[in-house]
Amino acid sequence: MRARRKAPHELDEERLVRLVAKGDRGAFDELYRRTSPWLAVRLRRRCADEQIVAEVMQETYLAVWRAAGAFAGSAVGGTAVGWLWTIAARRLVDAFRRRAHHAEPPLAAGERVAAPAAEDEVLAATVGGDVGDALRDLAPELRQVLQALVLDGLSVRETAVLLHLPEGTVKTRARRARVAMRKALT
C-alpha cells in the first residue's frame, strides 16, 4: 500500500522549501501564501517606501525559487522562515544601497503606533520573562540596533545602511544596549 502524498498545505515550511528545490510550483505557491504576509510586515517596519518593499519581496521569492536547493535547514540548526528572512533582509540592504546612489535614501519606517506591532508581540511571546522585560525597557534606538544585529542577524555595516546610521553609531548603540541589558538582568 502506497502512502498518500501530503498536499502542500499539510507540510511544514522546511519540507515546502525542499519541494521547491525540486521545482514543485504548488509547494512554492503554498510557501508564498504562508510567508508573504509576515515578510511584508517586517519589511515595511524597516522601509516605508512601498516600491522598495515590493521589489524586495519579488527579489526574495525569486531567490528562494532559484536557490531552494542550497537551503541546509535543520541539519545546521536553521529554519525555513529564518532562511527566508535572511534573504529578504539582505535584499533590502542591497535595495537601499542601489537607491542611495541615485536618490535620497528611502524613508525610515513611520512613527510607532500606540498599538503594539506584530513583531513586538511575537518577541514578547518568544523572549519572555526578565529578558523580554529588559528588551521592552530599552530605548527604541537601542532596541532597533539590537534587533537588527542579534535577532535579524545583520552585520554592523548592513545595520548601518538599514537604519541610516554611521557604523560607529551602530557599534556604540549595540554596546549601550548590551550594557543596559546586562544591568537589567543582574
Image (tube, grey):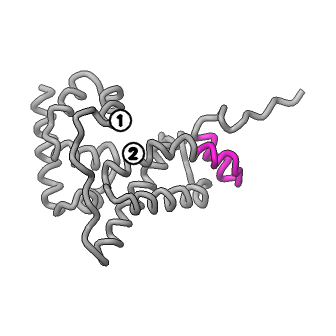
> How many residues crowd mark 1 within 10 Å: few (<14), some (14–19), many (20+)?
few
Dot 2, how many residues are within 10 Å of its Cα: few (below 14), some (14-19), or many (20+)? some
Q: CA distance from mark 1 to mark 2?
A: 8 Å
The quarter in which the N terminus is drawn is top right
Percent x, y for residue 172?
A: 12, 53
Q: Position of residue 102 (x, y in %)?
A: 31, 78
Q: Residue furthest right?
A: 1
Residue identified by numbered label 2: 41
| Residue 106 rendering spot, x and y as whole percentages | 28, 64
Type of amino acid under label 1:
Ala
Look at the numbered discs 1 and 2 and tell me whether their residues touch, using CB distance below 8 Å.
yes
- Quarter of the image that includes the C terminus: top left
Q: The residue tagged with tag 2: helix, strand or loop?
A: helix
Majority secondary structure of magenta residues:
helix
Residue type indicated by callout 2: Val
Q: Is residue 84 magenta?
A: no
The residue shown at (50%, 62%) is 59
Residue 68's disc number: none
**Residue at figure coordinates x 34%, y 37% from the top left:** 119
Q: How many marks?
A: 2
The residue range painted magenta reads 14-31
Could you tell which of marks 1 and 2 lies nearer the N-terminus? Answer: 2
The residue under label 1 is 118
In the displayed structure, does residue 13 sit left or right of residue 4? left
- Element at badge 1? helix
Residue occupying image coordinates x 16% and y 63%:
166
